[in-house]
Amino acid sequence: MKRFILLSWLALLFFPLVAQAQIGLRLKSDSQRYLRYEEITVSLLIRNYSGNTLVFNEKTNRIFFTVNELSGRTAPIFDKTANPAAGLILGPGEAKELRIVINTIHDMQREGIYTITAYLNHSRLPRTHVSEPINVEVHEGIVVLERNIGLPAEKSTDVIKSIRLVLMLFHDVEEKIYCLRAEDDENIYATFRLGPAIAGDNPMIDIDSSSLVHVLIQSRPRLYSYLLFGFVGRNMKLRQQRYYAAENGPPYLSRQDGFIRVKNGRPAIEGVDYDLKK
């Protein structure tokens, strides 16, 4: 009888450790600090130690998050039905990584520090599994310049819609970064990190007759990044990025002969003028 009681106590003692080991969760963010309204992407690595295949459907067997501000305020949820694990099949011993834009699920528009924790529920597991929390910061940038542009209409009788381009200087953890935001009075449509702010001129921005946005930014002492953005409706997309090396003076955007081109620069050669891996 005493041996049975001892074994029972040992089983109870070690059960939480066994249950905890059935699923491993590791949560991390792409950056520690984000510009306000920028996509906040986190990755969740899930490893299955249960010895069984786990299938996640849309309504049950789900992953969810809590997001709390430093003050203790809980960030409101945009979509309570969101389940990043929907359709996931995890074999025994298998690990998979999910990429989640967390601020499409939770409202993280306020400036401040947020603590994010991931949770996993499955009907075949005896308990909810919880990740270690991570912290991310959200800050607003400093406006450098603004440009209002009209967007092409589908019909000649349609009301011409406009959008505002805002060039901002954002203080990241280790450096200052130029960012570009597309917005109007009601919505934020896109936010892009252009590159680090180094000593030199501000980025040049120009818009052509097709409402394509041309940006030229100095990346290194003699290297410039040329970016071309286009619109699909009000959605702004990066269409092209090229690098130019300085030649006969600092490169600049020119409108000569009706087209916007990079002057005083030659196309840079990867491995000679720059190395993206560094």
Image (tube, grey):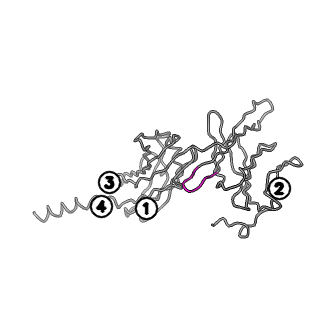
Secondary-structure class at tag 2:
strand
Q: Residue at x 71, y 70 (%)?
A: 271
Mark 1 is surrounded, within 10 Å at the Cα level, by few (under 14), some (14 to 19) or many (20 or more) other residues, namely many
For the C terminus, the image quarter is bottom right
- Nearer the viewer's eye, disc 4 or disc 3? 4
Which image quadrant for residue 73? top left
Q: Is residue 143 magenta?
A: no
4 or 3: tag closer to the N-terminus = 4
Numbered marks: total: 4
Residue for badge 3: 126
Residue type of the residue flagged with mark 2? Lys
Q: Are the residues tagged 3 and 1 within 8 Å (C-beta)?
A: no
Q: Residue at x 61, y 43 (%)?
A: 142
For the N terminus, the image quarter is bottom left
Where are the magenta residues, as a range?
171-177
- Nearer the viewer's eye, disc 1 or disc 2? 2
Residue for badge 4: 17
- Nearer the viewer's eye, disc 2 or disc 4? 2
Residue type of the residue flagged with mark 1? Arg
Residue for badge 2: 263
Residue type of the residue flagged with mark 4? Leu
Secondary-structure class at tag 3:
loop
Q: Is residue 172 magenta?
A: yes
Mark 2 is surrounded, within 10 Å at the Cα level, by few (under 14), some (14 to 19) or many (20 or more) other residues, namely some
6 versus 253 height, above or below: below
Residue for badge 1: 47
User: Residue 163: x and y, percent?
Assistant: 70, 37
- For the residues labelled 3 and 1, the Cα–Cα distance comes to 16 Å
Foreground pick, 247 / 55: 247
Q: Are the residues tagged 2 and 3 within 8 Å (C-beta)?
A: no
Residue type of the residue flagged with mark 3? Pro
